[in-house]
Image (tube, helix red, strand yellow):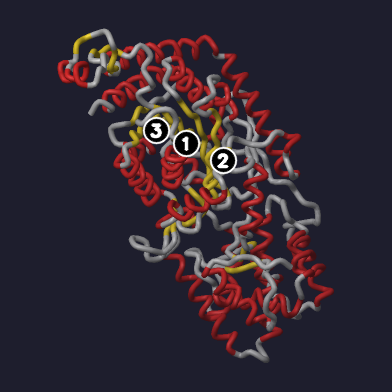
Amino acid sequence: MEKQCYTAQQRRAANLVWTAAGAYGFDPMFLASHSDGTPDFYMNCVVGLVRKYYGDEIPRALFALWEEDRRQPLLDDLTWLFLESAVYANELPCRPVLSELRREHAEEFFGQEYQLSRQEWMSKNQLVYTMQAARWRSVQGRNPPVMTPYESRLAAALAPDRTPDPQELTPAVLQVFERFALFDGKVQPKAAVRLHFEGLAAKILSKTHPVQLVRTDRLTVGQSVAAEGEGKGPRQDLRGALVELRQNGEEDRNYIESCFGRSLYPPERLARAEQQLCAGVHLGCHLWFSSGVPRPEQARTGDARRLADQAELQAERNRKFFAQNRELYQGAIGRLTGQIRNSILIHRQPDALCARTGKLDAARVWRMAVMEDDRVFLRAEEENRPAFTVDLLLDASASRLHCQEIIAAQGYILAESLRRCAIPVRVSAFCSLRGYTVVRVLKDFGQRDAGGTFRYFASGWNRDGLALRAAGDLTDFAPGPADRHLLILLTDASPNDSRRIPPGPGYPLGAAYDGPAAVNDAAAEVRALERKGIRVSAVFMGPGPAGKDAGTIYGPNLARITGMDQLAAAAGRLIQRQIRSLDD
């Protein structure tokens, strides 16, 4: 097997697995970690013991039985409880220290109740948590938690009286799952229906139903509900267990490239950008810059072909939605174009050129006699070079699935209005997936047609701070035909990523990349870009509570809208303010 690269934490976890297995050099299929990313000592020992007693192929084939099933995280976690009980009973006689390690793990399990964030608690399936609590309470010699008869019988079944032999393991696990109606051997695809609840309804349902935070590790394009009455959400690869498949760096990179196409950056330039930008709170993350997704006939893998087909279908939905509302949107383009032109006429003075006719420049008269240079007059440049460029950056995370067509229309309106004013504009979309923040250029400066904006689709997470860093680096790499730059984001101001902030200054134990930590990071990156000379502003259309976060991130350079009819006026005021600021 090809050796894989490990982070420092993964290396520690792998060493624990190898030691328990009594074998070295293999790449464990699973590694166990705490919620803060540090290795789980006891459960990595369990992973190694599973390898020792059952080899590699039997557990791999067992977990593969329900891969892509909608209850895969639940089945994974329950299987690990079964395996833990089996290998503990086998190993204890020859390794008595396991008893103490097991008790320490039980204490750590209950100790984490006071450390987990709200999102981490949401990621726990209630049945799994009850089974885990029952197991670790029994290890501590405490009474089990309050359980239904069904839960009590399941907890007993996950702690078999007799350790199954290797050939008995798979039938034993499947028998438990079938007995308790958890898995009948047939994979049930993940549900495509997405229901979103807020306020009181969300609070009530989270108390009475299992709640899970969806992690987006497989890229798919979901249908919006903006264009049609009902839509399909993304099919996502769910693996919420703390004992989870270890990420493979080379596979992830190949997956990103197959889905989004080759990087616009040369390899050396991309490596340098990652080294400089993926630091601090973004340590361990990666970057990718591309011009979109390959066409279906160019895709190299099945996943990439499906994505390309879905992306083309979403592009058609975007164009269809714009065409259905063409009168409204063309009117918005006309109004915004007029506002921008008026602002340019008022605030941008034409450049003065040295010429043989025009207004005499007294400071240059001496050149006629001394240097025989008759260009001692000044005249206005008839065709000015553009005074500035605009980078339009669209949030393309899964939180925008419900309004993809609207965002594509917004981006097109802004890009087309700027283009009609002879302002160079580049349109990009960003999302994060498998630790990669991906920036897709939909329309470049040199392309006159803004129609590429309709290739927008939403999927994945959004690590706004790193995306802002990437946008600044893209400006350095391909600055366009002007020296001054405006960056305008279309955003819901809700940064959220599956990759945690690593331990470091300000976060001794690390932190989830969401909430105040992510908002503060995005705000800091906005200020850093402004110090660099890039003017940053945002058009915000999102839920009410996020408005405060939008203000924190973008300050006064924020235009808030609640509907498409407000876009031209709000964006016009925003762009006018930024054009005035260029004279400062």
According to the picture, the residue beneath numbered tag 3 turns out to be 487
Residue plotted at (43% across, 56% down): 279
According to the picture, the residue beneath numbered tag 2 turns out to be 264
Q: Which mark is residue 478?
A: 1
Question: In 3D space, how far apart are the residues under numbered discs 2 and 3 (Cα atoms)?
Answer: 20 Å
Work out which quarter of the rendered image holds the N terminus and state it: bottom right
Residue plotted at (46% across, 43% down): 470
Is 478 drawn above or below residue 34 in the view shown? above
What is the number of callouts on the image? 3
The amino acid sitting under disc 2 is Leu
Q: What element does badge 2 sit on?
A: loop
Question: In 3D space, how far apart are the residues under numbered discs 1 and 2 (Cα atoms)?
Answer: 10 Å
Name the quadrant containing residue 469.
Answer: top left
Question: In 3D space, how far apart are the residues under numbered discs 1 and 3 (Cα atoms)?
Answer: 14 Å
Q: Out of 362 and 223, give the one closest to the viewer.
A: 362
271 horizontally vs 548: left or right: right
> In the image, which is nearer the foreground, mark 2 or mark 3?
2
The amino acid sitting under disc 1 is Ala
Q: Can residue 582 be seen in this view?
A: yes
